Structures are given as C-alpha cells and as structure tokens.
Image (cartoon, helix red, strand yellow):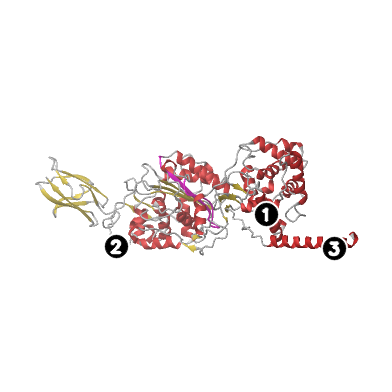
Amino acid sequence: MIRRLAPFAVVLALWLGAGLRDHLDAWVTATKLPPVLVETSVELRDRHGHLMRVFPVEDGRVRLALRLDQVDPDFLAMLIAYEDKRFYSHAGVDPWAVLRAAGQAVLAGKVVSGGSTLTMQVARLLENSGTGRWAGKLRQVRLALALERRLTKAQILELYLAHAPYGGAVEGLRAGSLAWFGKEPARLTMAEAALLVALPQAPEARRPDRHPDAATAARMRVLNRVDAPRQMRLAAVPDKMLPFVRLAPHLADALRQQDPLRQRHDLTLDAGLQQQMETLLARIARRQAAGVSAAVVIADYRSAEVLASVGSAGYGAADGNLGFVDMTRAPRSPGSTLKPFIYGLAFDQGLAHPDTLIDDSPVAFGRYAPQNFDGQFRGELTVREALQLSLNIPPVLLTQELGPSRLMATLRKGGADPQVPGGKAGLAVALGGVGMTLNDLVQLYGGLANGGVVHPLIWEKDQATAPPARLMSRSAAWQVGHILASIAPPPGTAAQASGIAYKTGTSYGHRDAWAIGFDGAHVIGVWLGRPDGTPVPGAFGGDLAAPVLFEAFGRLKARPVSLPPPPPETLLVSTAALPKPLQRFRGRNAVFARAADAPVVRFPPNGAVLRRGPEGMPLKLSAGVLPLTILVNGAPLLTDLRQREVMLPMVGPGFARISVIDAKGRAADVQIRIQ
C-alpha cells in the first residue's frame, strides 16, 4: 500500500512546490519598485577635476554621483566580505545567513547578527523603512527579490554606495569619504575603508567625532574579518567631519541658476588659485572700514579662460559688507580705467601719437568743465605723460574729437555692456560717467593685451561664446600697453613685479577703487568699495586696489611674463620727428582756437570787483610776444611794454575793459569793476 502511495506523494509534493514557486514568482513579479534613479548633488569642478562646490539634494542631504570604477576594488572586496560574502551568488536573500542569524538568536536569546543581504539593505534604504518589524523584513525580502530580477549586481551595488548613510546629512560612499577623510573613495587606506564599511549600520551611534570608541570597535570588527595588518588597527579614527568645499560661491550660484537641470559643471577655474584669492580678499577687507568689500577676476587672455573669480570678500553679510552681492557682475563707475581705450582709439584715428603734445589747461564744453583730480593743470605735455599721470583734460579733449558714441560702440564691440545714465553718452563717460562691471573691464583689458583683439571670457570648458572682435590696431594696443607698463608699481611691491601694464581708477565720491593690469599672458582686475554705493572717504585706486593687484600677480606666478615687442608697423619716433599734424594735438575747432603762445591775462580775473589802490591796479600777464600794448576801454594806456607784470595808473570808479595786444596782433581781454 505504501509503495503504491509513494509516487502519488512525490507528485503531490512536486505539485505543491510548483504551485508555491509560481505563487512566489507572481508575488515577486507584482512588486512595485520604488524609484531607483538616484538624485545626486550638483557638482562644480575646476580645470583639473577637483571639487569646488556641492549643492545639497532636495532633502538637504549631500549625495554625490559615483560609479563602481571610481571606487577602490579593495573597498568593494572588504564590503562584500563583511556584509554579504555570497552577494554574487544569491538571488537577493541569503538562506544560509538567515538560518545562521536565527540559530544565533535562539542560542543567545537575543539578536547577535543580522541576515540582511546588501540587496535587502538597498531595499530598506530606497524605502527608508525600519529593520525591526517582521512586516518590514518581509517587505525588504520581497523588494530584494524583485530588485535582483530587474537590476544587475553592479547596479544594486551602485545603489547601495549611493544611499548608504555616513552620519548627519551625508549619504553615499563618495560623500562619506570626502566628509571623513577629504579624499575620493579611489584613494582610501585599508583603515579608512574599514570605517566606511562599518559606519552605515549605525551612522549616528558610530560617528567617530562623537563616539570614537564605538567607531574604533566597529572598524576593528571589519579589519579582523579581512585579517588586516596590525598597523591598520592602530590608526586613529577622524575626530571631526570635514566641511564640503564651497569655492566661487557667486559664480556657482549664477551657473546653477542659468541651467538648473545640469548635474555637473566643469569650470576653467583653478581651485588652488581661487582659494588663495578668496583668502587674500578676506584679509584685505578686514583691514578696511566697515562695509568695504572686494572682488577680483583673473583670466588667461590668450584663451579667455577665467582662472579665478571672487565676487566679494565674504559670502555672508558679516559687518554689513553685503557679501552675497557678486561685485564681478555689478555695474559701477570705472573711474579712469577707460582712458587707455580713448588713447588707443585716438592713435588709430590719427588724432594723436604717444609723443604728441597736448594741452592740459582749463577748458569748458558748454556747462561741462572737467578738472584734474588734484585741481592743478600741467600745461603742454606729451600724450604719454598725460596717460601716465592719469590727467582728465586730455582724454576729454580726445573724446570730444572721437565722439562719445564711438567710445561706447568700441566698448560694446568688445562684449561689454556699458550702462549710460539717461541713455545718451556725453563727454563725462571719458572720466567714468558710465556703469561697467569688473568682468567687462577684465575682458576689455584682455583685448588690449592681446594686440587689440578681444575674446569673450569663458568660465566653463564647454561654454559657447561669440567670435573675437578687434577693438583697435595691434600697434595702437601695443603703444597703450607700453605706456601703462612704464607706470611705477605701488610702493613696497617686489622688484620682480615690474613690467606689469596697469591702470588704476577712482570713481566720483570715492565710491569705487579699481586696478586692472596685464602681463604677457594674464589679466587681473581688482575692485574695492561698498556694494551699496556709499562713499569710502580717502579711497583711491592707486592706494587700495593697486597693491592687491600686484599681490594677486605674485600669487599667480613667480614672475610676470614679458610683454611682446612692438609690431613692425609701430611708429617709434620723438615729437620733433612726427609728421607736422601729429606734433601737437589740435581739435576740430583749432582754426578758431587761441594759439598756445597767445597772451593771457592772469590777473585780474574776468568779472572781478576790485578796490583802487593808491598806486593803481596790478596787471599780470603770461605768454604773448613782446612788446605788448595795454588798452583800457579801447584807449592805449601803455605801449612798447616789455614786461608781463605792471601797475596800471587807472582813475575813476566803474566798469573797465582791459585789453592786451602782443607783437603779433593777438589779443586777450578781461572786464572788471573798480570801486
């Protein structure tokens, strides 16, 4: 009888097993998977691939993208040996591990070890579920089996490495490696790898900065499992979590805002240089009055790649310096920094040459009467000297001839966006009456250094840019650069800094201090001031910004790269050897203008009201060819006068017109009132 029933029992068992298998298969197949696409932090990397900025994901956690080939193979081997040694052979659940854990629990009366596989841990991490309830365990088993059917082992391992917690808001192996050891997971030591294997099981209870004993013990268990050398077991655990790097925050914010869906930005910046510049500006700002900030941009003008960009002396709002404002992009008055472009255009237009004589004397254009910064006038001097001394009258005279619109068109051609108050440019633009950004000025000066050809600045390696544009001829650009290179460096600057062509600027009311300079390869722009536009009394570009410029060059390189020689077409002659029209600057109204050596009444000034003295009234003259004739109200008073200072024996109160005529018949007069 038993023999007749045995085949039936086998068939029944097989039937029940097949049914159970089919039911289990359907149960697993019907499993709804949680999202397996990993949201990772947006990263910005420098020109060498070094991390510069990390943006947290939506829940505020730092979770960095990571591929298996970016992980040390020894770490992966250690992880699998400790956590799930049959990972590559089971289907999501390891029956032997479950039986072992159950047996240990029965014998010890408590949970001694877990039976979770790496796949089950991934299931728990994806759903953020607990581990202590049977319902949760059953869900993890079901999800693990489903994951194994739909993903490869490599994909499951990458999910674990992306989601494993490492304490605080740090998630994933790469973020954990950077937070605890400051290095990528491809360069971990055995002791470092062991700690990162142990941490995810109890990331808060084993945090080495808070619970070093627990962290050390957990790491020791991992090292014992893989028979690590003794010296690895003696290594200290880290005592603090390292902050994630946050370089170039203003640029990072701007790039992310421009392309919010992009996960990685590969920049042209150099992280080491960027860090140096941020440290430098923070130190400089601490020495200034409250609220003063600073900005700097460094670029290789040959490739137009920006190497450093610091928008403020500090990203926060400490001391009221409005550090969150990016001063590399804020329009400000450029002061005298546009003068080199005026001279370059004048050279190209045949209006002047560096050795052309130009008159630095009082002048008025209607109601606009520009003054030099010190209130003095130098008279006749060369254009070269006028630019070196940063005088105001000569560039205004040249702008009058060029036309302010030509200057504005040139700036726009160079990629700048000058902001003109009222929308119409006047002569005041020559002295800074226009809004320009630090980026604009660095780009324009890069073109000046590059033989007159501007390349738009580049911040990202794959950035699309406009084609280059020519601002001026290469000879004009060289002449301007040669003059700027002859300006003495700031006091206290190292001797090797000589040879840098630079220009400073101070805006009206001491609101902005500038220094822009270049050598044979790089251009640097520096700005100091208050972001809110309030004055900084006593602030001058030469005193504040120029020393920072030269220190930045010193941080960039040991010695400046030499400027290029003059192009062969450059006219290098003295004033006397220039063509006659270029020997002295004469504007479009020169035929009606007073000759340089015509007589001038220095005293009394026109419109003066004077008391008649007992000896008469003093008359002081300058220029004019002797002898001179003096007329009062049209009647000759003195003739054949061979001196330029005399007492006039005038009689009677009232208005009087005093006229002076020199030997060439040229005249000057003033009207005064005698009391």
Which of 601 and 469 lies nearest the eye of the viewer? 469
User: On screen, 498 above or below 155?
Assistant: above
Q: Give the numbered dot on residue 363.
A: none
User: Residue flagged by tag 1: what amino acid is it?
Assistant: Glu
SS state under label 2: helix
- Which is in the foreground here, disc 2 or disc 1? 1
User: On screen, 316 above or below 344?
Assistant: above
Let me know if residue 439 is in the magenta part.
no
Q: CA distance from mark 2 to mark 1?
A: 83 Å
Q: Position of residue 557 (x, y in %)?
A: 56, 46
Q: CA distance from mark 1 to mark 3?
A: 48 Å
Q: CA distance from mark 2 to mark 3?
A: 128 Å
- Which is in the foreground here, disc 1 or disc 3? 3
Give the residue furthest to the bottom. Answer: 467
Let me know if residue 292 is in the magenta part.
yes
Report which residue position mark 1 lands on: 158
The C terminus - image quarter:
top left
Q: Which residues are magenta?
A: 289-312
Report which residue position mark 3 lands on: 8
SS state under label 1: helix
User: Residue flagged by tag 2: what amino acid is it?
Assistant: Val
